[in-house]
Image (cartoon, rainbow, N blue to C red):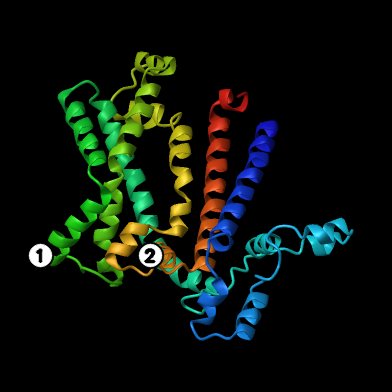
Amino acid sequence: MKRFLIRRLLAVVPVLFGVLLLTFALSRLLPDDFASRLGGDYASQEMLADLRWAHGLDKPLFVAWDRLLSGNIAAAFDSQFIGHCRRLFTLDFGRSWSALRPVSHLLREGVGPSLAITVPVLLGSAAVSLLLGMLAAFVWRTRWDRWLLGACTLNMSIPGVALMLAAQYFVAFEWGWAPVHGWAGGRGLVLPVLLGIFIGLGADVRFCRVVLLKELHEDFMRTALAKGVGGWRLYAVHALRPAIGPLLAHWLPRLPLLLTGSLFLERIFGIPGLGGMMVDAISARDFPVVNAMTFIAAVLHLFGQTLADIISARFDPRIRLS
């Protein structure tokens, strides 16, 4: 287990380096003069030079080879990429180019609305999909199982954006059961949360059904049946307990969604969370915000995936030996 843990942690290093390189490429290697964008159309050459110096744009991209060949190693690696990595690792995300405010302040303001949506969606989807997956396993090979699988397939076939727009038009605009757009507290969260749970429900129910059916055909389940265990106790206790590992490995990689928010839900319903802020930053080419959100999402995703692998290895020795 220790060797497996060391291998997984070492595998995070190249992935994180690739994320740093990608975020740097987004803000530096595009054919655009960022000093001109920051200074505006009427900025003088002196002002543009000051902006390039203030943002480190006058430094070499990766390595100053002339300084390296002369033996000045510290000055050779005083580059834009090294500064970019240092700022992200120290959580110094800079200032937003469009809002002209520190990116950390924008993140603190948007994390509350995002958590108000993502936490109920994650918990609700896990609970509903697990209950429906247990129901599908309980009625396996019956017409109820076929109807439930058909409903899951239909749910997976409907585009999420189309469902959001249809619900916004009919439920909010035509029937007036919910606010159409804007941050309206608890009442404005009901429709986005229900949509967030419903959109990904089909795939989750099918996954839970497969995991539980696999456990139902193990030898220990026949032993439990021989001892007289039956009904919902057979599914809720004996089948669900060994299935915890695969189920957690399925849901833990979604932990980044708790902080990064839902791009489409927040954008369509006008919720001022991190997901909507990310969409606005991409449209405005506000690279400090884009870099910060990309880095945070990558780190959280690596954390969730590593945690899921460790839990899976804890329940399945074959993973540790792979």
Q: Is residue 304 above or below residue 68?
A: above
Q: Residues within 10 Å of mark 1 (few under 14, many from 20)?
A: few
Q: Position of residue 68 (x, y in %)?
A: 83, 57
- Specify whether 76 is left or right of 276: right
**Which three-letter amino acid code belongs to the residue tagged 2?**
Gly
Q: Residues within 10 Å of mark 2 (few under 14, many from 20)?
A: many
The furthest residue to the left: 174
Sequence-wise, the earlier of marks 1 and 2 is 1
**Which three-letter amino acid code belongs to the residue tagged 1?**
Glu
Picture disc at residue 284: none
Q: Secondary structure at mark 2?
A: helix
- Screen quadrant of the C terminus: top right
Can the viewer see residue 175? no
Picture disc at residue 276: 2
Give the number of the mark in front: 1 or 2.
2
Which residue lies at the image location 63% right of the left edge and 62% below the top edge?
A: 88
Which residue lies at the image location 46% right of the left edge and 72% below the top edge?
A: 109
Which residue is under mark 1?
Answer: 174
- Specify whether 71 is left or right of 28: right
The quarter of the displayed image where residue 175 is located: bottom left
> Camera-side residue: 281 or 35?
35
